[in-house]
Image (cartoon, grey):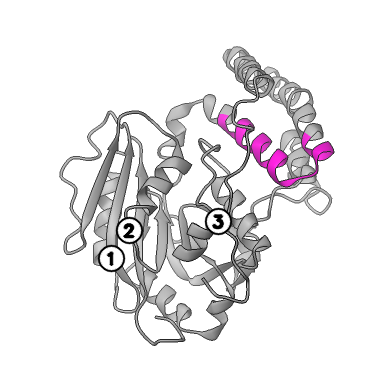
Amino acid sequence: MTAATGTAPTADVVIVNWNTGPYLGECLRSIADTDRSLFRVARIVVVDNASTDTSLDGLSAADIPLDVVRNGSNRGFATACNQGAARGGSDFVLFLNPDTRLRSDTLRVIGRFLRTPAADRFGIFGALMVDRSGRPQISCSRFPSLRGYLGRMTGLDRLVPRLLPPQHLRPEELNRSGPVDQVIGAFFLVRRPLFTSLGGFDEGYFLYLEEVDFALRARRAGWPSYHVNQARVCHIGQVSSAQLGPWRHYLSLCSRSRYAFRQWKAHRAWLLVALSLSVEPLARLAVAARRRQWGDLGPTLAVYWRFLRWFRDGRGLGPPPRPVSRSRSTPP
């Protein structure tokens, strides 16, 4: 509900699917089974990026209208999210991964918080991700930094986290609700007017960092993110991306380079690319050799060669989406 009107807000749930097997159907059932008395689900939009499995067979969301969009090719996560959001008109858009499960009280907890005056200052909301046993998982992150990427490239973020802080917040850092840099995209609830005013997700991202980019743009527009700790969501994780093998890292390289040139000063973005083509591949090759994983050497080199070609050709580094101007004094 909203503090201003006392009426229950509505959300359109957008789920992007790519070969997630039975997980998608289980996710839909969890939405249908959760308590929606304080936060109504107007519709569920499943956007399928040319799956070749049976994940779309026999889908049902009980009493919730279900809209399935079938793309003829894999158009990427950001584009598919924008497709799904455009098919609704509710107060909020909830982007939900198909490998998530809402608990019986997840939306009731979110709806209760949205009734409080504190919620009016935030534009994006996230929940606490847990595994099947209820143990906390990655739920929120810091905005990416050059120091953070250097730590991940070298593994030093695990040895000297104070000097090179990891990007993801540890579970012990999320023992209460509060503002965060960004919530992960597995459960990403955003005010629809804010989503529209910022032009949605930047479709130059094929996979990874599209929600991080959006969260930073939202914060700069005066609408930061908030972690609702009491709302729990079971997240399996990497059901689709694990099928990509080593090319998952290629997509990560492309996305983080796009992010750097969008959001950082130019010299820092160029330094990130230089490190990505020197320090990181050498570190990965050294680890593979130390572990005698000789079969990983060729694929690793192929990933960085393809990334170099992508960067050289300037693909994905075009202009960002043009936002619609909005005064911070007017809540979306």
Q: In terms of image quadrants, where is residue 157? A: top right
**Is residue 276 rendered to the left or right of residue 9?**
right
Look at mark 1 in the image and give the residue it sits on: 42
**Is residue 88 rendered to the left or right of residue 194?**
left
User: What kind of residue is marked 2?
Assistant: Gly
In the image, residue 182 above or below residue 115? above
Residue visible at 60% across and 51% down? 212
Look at mark 3 in the image and give the residue it sits on: 198
In the image, residue 33 above or below residue 57? below
Q: Which contiguous range is marked in magenta? A: 251-269
User: What kind of residue is marked 3?
Assistant: Leu
User: What kind of residue is marked 1?
Assistant: Ala
Q: Is residue 149 visible?
A: yes
Could you say where residue 248 lies in the image, as x and y percent from the top left? 53, 30
| Quadrant of the drawing holding the N terminus | bottom left
Residue visible at 64% across and 32% down? 317
Which of the pair 37/194 is nearer the observer?
194
Magenta stretch: dominant SS?
helix
Q: Is residue 133 visible?
A: no
Disc 1 to disc 3, how far (Cα)? 23 Å
Disc 1 is placed on an element classified as strand
Disc 3 to disc 2, how far (Cα)? 17 Å
| CA neighbours of label 2 inside 10 A, class few (<14), some (14 to 19), many (20+) | many
Disc 2 is placed on an element classified as loop
Disc 2 to disc 1, how far (Cα)? 8 Å
Look at mark 2 in the image and give the residue it sits on: 88
Which of the pair 252/165 is nearer the observer?
252
Could you say where residue 128 lies in the image, as x and y percent from the top left? 50, 63
Q: In terms of image quadrants, where is residue 95? A: bottom left
Q: Are marks 2 and 1 in contact (CB under 8 Å)?
A: yes
